[in-house]
């Protein structure tokens, strides 16, 4: 249950190997489909900040490496609830650090929503980002910026919308001295990144650096 799983996460953070190693084995034996709702609940409502952070890190890892182990088995209603909870977590979070961690989880989740033809099958996350950019809350604006810095191809085939969001961010006077196109899993094709870079350079101030961060994990 929730309390036992929280205790398990605490043991995972233990500096003592004789405590941490059995906890790692126990955690690995928990099915991904069982981990996700527990991790999400702890990330959103845990009392211990370090445990919440650990839950966010582990949830992102599930979305990155074990998505296909649990997603196909979910009912459509369960899928919709999970999508809604991911976005609601960002909206409800009062602290900047955890909101950033939640944005990273949401970005990895959204990466899995892009189909083989480059279409984003989660339109609500795009709507969420547009609304966040226009929000009066700097934390929500920064969350939107962080999501598409982690997944530069989040708009799929609608790269024009991505450029429009960047323009809106510039209008909002969010301070930044660089933009990083971050593709940690190495799954965004080079043509998409090239076209995105050209579009960004056209609208970014000349003193703002444009970086690309990627890992060659998909041989793209």
Image (cartoon, rainbow, N blue to C red):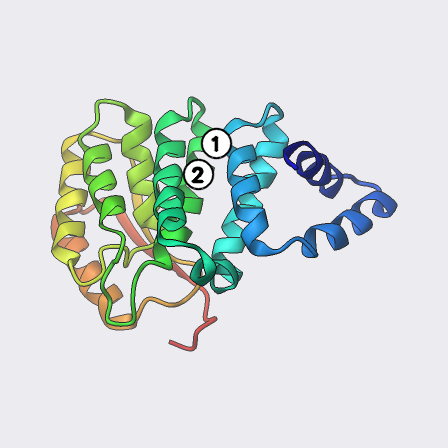
Residue 86 lies in quadrant: top left
The residue closer to the viewer here, 130 or 203, is 130
Q: Secondary structure at mark 2?
A: helix
- Which quadrant would the N terminus be assigned to in this image? top right
* Crowd class of label 2 (few under 14; some 14 to 19; many from 20; radius 10 Å): many
Residue 4 lies in quadrant: top right
Instruction: State the residue lying farthest toward the right.
Output: 18
Please name the residue that numbered disc 1 is placed on: 98
Residue found 84% across the figure and 47% down from its top? 17
Residue 175 in view of the camera:
no
Q: Secondary structure at mark 1?
A: helix
- Which quadrant would the C terminus be assigned to in this image? bottom left
Q: Estimate the x, y position of residue 96 in percent, counting from the top left.
A: 43, 27
Separation (CA) of disc 1 from disc 2 = 6 Å
* Crowd class of label 1 (few under 14; some 14 to 19; many from 20; radius 10 Å): some
Q: Is residue 99 left or right of residue 172?
A: right
Q: Estimate the x, y position of residue 168 in percent, counting from the top left.
A: 14, 38
Residue 102 in view of the camera:
yes
Please name the residue that numbered disc 2 is placed on: 102
- Classify 113 as above or below 164: below
Residue found 63% across the figure and 34% down from its top? 2
Instruction: State the residue lying farthest toward the bottom.
Output: 219
Q: Is residue 160 left or right of residue 102?
A: left
Q: Is residue 158 left or right of residue 101?
A: left
């Amino acid at each position: 249950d929730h309390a036992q799983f929280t205790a398990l996460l605490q043991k995972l953070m233990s500096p003592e190997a004789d405590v941490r190693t059995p906890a790692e084995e126990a955690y690995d034996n928990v099915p991904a489909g069982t981990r996700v709702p527990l991790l999400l609940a702890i990330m959103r409502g845990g009392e211990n900040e370090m445990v919440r952070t650990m839950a966010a890190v582990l949830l992102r890892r599930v979305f990155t490496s074990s998505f296909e182990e649990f997603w196909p088995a979910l009912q459509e209603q369960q899928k919709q609830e999970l999508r809604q909870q991911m976005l609601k977590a960002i909206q409800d979070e009062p602290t900047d650090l955890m909101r950033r961690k939640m944005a990273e989880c949401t970005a990895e989740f959204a990466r899995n929503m892009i189909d083989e033809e480059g279409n984003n099958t989660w339109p609500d996350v795009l709507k969420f980002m547009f609304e966040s950019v226009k929000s009066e809350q700097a934390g929500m604006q920064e969350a939107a910026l962080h999501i598409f810095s982690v997944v530069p191809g989040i708009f799929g085939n609608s790269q024009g919308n991505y450029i429009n969001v960047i323009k809106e961010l510039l209008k909002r006077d969010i301070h930044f001295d660089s933009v990083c196109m971050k593709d940690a899993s190495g799954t965004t094709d080079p043509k998409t990144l090239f076209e995105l870079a050209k579009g960004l350079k056209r609208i970014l101030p000349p003193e703002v650096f444009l970086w690309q961060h990627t890992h060659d994990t998909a041989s793209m």
